Image: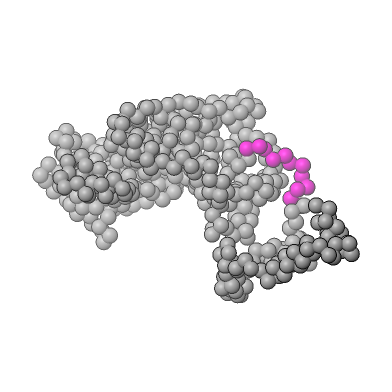
Amino acid sequence: MALLAQLARGCTSKITKFPIEVAASTICVHHFSSRVPYDTYNNTKARRARELRPRRNYLKNDDVEKHRSSFLQDKPVLEEDVDQQPASVPRDFRHVMPEFLPNPNPLMRDRISERLERMDMYQRRAVIDIPEFYVGSIMAVTMADKYAPGKQTRFVGICIDRGGHGLRANFILRNYIDGQGVEILFDLYNPTLQKIEVLKLEKRLDDQLFYLRDAPPEYSTVPFDFQPVPLPRGATVPINSIKVKLNPRPWLERWERMNLQGIEDLELPEKFYIRAKAVAKPWEKYDLMKQYRASVNDDEAATIMKEVLSKTGTTKRMGGQQKISLRKGR
Amino acid sequence: MAEAEKLESTAEWSLAETRNFYALLYTTNCLQELRKLARVRVVDNSALGRAATVAGKPARIIHVYNKQEVACLGDKVLLAIKGQKKRAYVVGCKQKQQPNIPRFDSNNVVLVEDNGSPVGTRITVPIPSALRAKEGDFTKILSLATRFV
């Protein structure tokens, strides 16, 4: 170790006779000649040439970002501008306003269009109150309908799915009306929606409730005159741990393979569970790369949500729910 | 696919094994398209529709009056019901719909006579509000509706 330390300091006068110096020189030679082949890690000469080749109608995002934040612009958009307001990012912001986060698929990413869409979303949110809601919440949507007598219709139902990114965010409401299951998919930022109400804010044990299609009607029946259920200010969103008893087979999907928490025991023959176990992929929850690819990284999400909070001014949680409780109190 | 190969290697299949094999082959969901021979539910209060339901033989589409040969909301179809040929309009689909258009749990139709007047006098299920944009014979059907969604 002492010899190595001397080498590092450049004190070679004392150790010229030692063979270690020879070894050190050979190491240097090896480093520059690089015995490691180029195609390790798929870094081939052809691939590097392909990446360097100029592409038509293509701008590197770094270059665009540099010009956008240039001081030569009239109003350069800087990250510091976004950070000015001391808005504290709520802990579960990803779940309160998930539609502001972009599609995690890198092939679908386009920073400019994402920013433009967010601007449109702020404009829409300035006009209509889009409350906090989750899959399992009971909601009412009033939309413009030029053929209806009052030029508007109202649909009440339980939210069974929520999806989409940016302006294309949507949710599905399900209800059972006159012995008939009815579902409507609404675009969250559709300008023909006049009012979105959350009548009962709660979560369920699953991310999607499509199994209500195979359940008895009482699980998805919501009366149209359902009164809003107020939630105390600052309370956490309650989780409804109801277990749904599904109808006997045949079903629309193989629910026994989906690891659902919100359904009762399905009472199937043993072979169904054996097959479900055979096709299950229990290792996927340990696949860090898969999780990384399926989600927007935390730094980027925090930057976006800081911008969202500064633009919409909703620093407090559960804006919609508080408004409902106020309306009830009047 | 290992199980499918195992099934193939056996000389004689039981009925259950055959079913399992085909269950392995078809893994996609049904498209729920209203083509020829699709079963539909008659939702007006006509005696013919109720008799077909009671007999356990729901009406079948035997022709779709459009070029695609797949019936959508508001399309006219020809039904085979209780040994008769009847025309009907589709007033609710199970298939995935556009935003703001309701999707129903069953494929609903309303029977009409050849002259376009409805057979029944009342429709028992909700009707999509978007159908109110339709003109012509359809207004006779819409006047039977009890509820719009």
Render colour scheme: one colour
Quarter holding residue A180 = top left
Q: Residue at x 26, y 61 (%)?
A: B67
Relative to B125, is A19 above or below? below
Give percent across and percent down for residue B103.
Answer: 37, 44
Left or right? Give the position of A303 relative to B90.
right
Please provide the residue range marked out in magenta: A81-92
Q: Residue visible at 67% across and 38% down?
A: A90
Q: Position of residue A283 (x, y in %)?
A: 48, 42
Q: Main secondary structure of the magenta part?
A: loop
Q: In the rendering, at what x and y percent does residue B110 appear?
A: 24, 43
Q: Nearer the viewer, residue A109 or B66?
A: A109
Does residue A121 appear left or right of residue A8 in this picture?
left
In which quarter of the view is residue A320 placed? top right
Examine the rendered structure and indicate whether residue A164 appears above or below residue A195: below
Give me the residue at 44% from left, 30% from top. Answer: A262
Q: In the rendered view, tell whether residue A76 sits above or below residue B147.
A: below
Q: Residue furthest front?
A: A17
A243 drawn magenta: no
Q: Is residue A85 magenta?
A: yes
Would you say residue A181 is visible in this rendering?
A: no
Question: Is any part of residue A195 visible from this angle?
Answer: yes
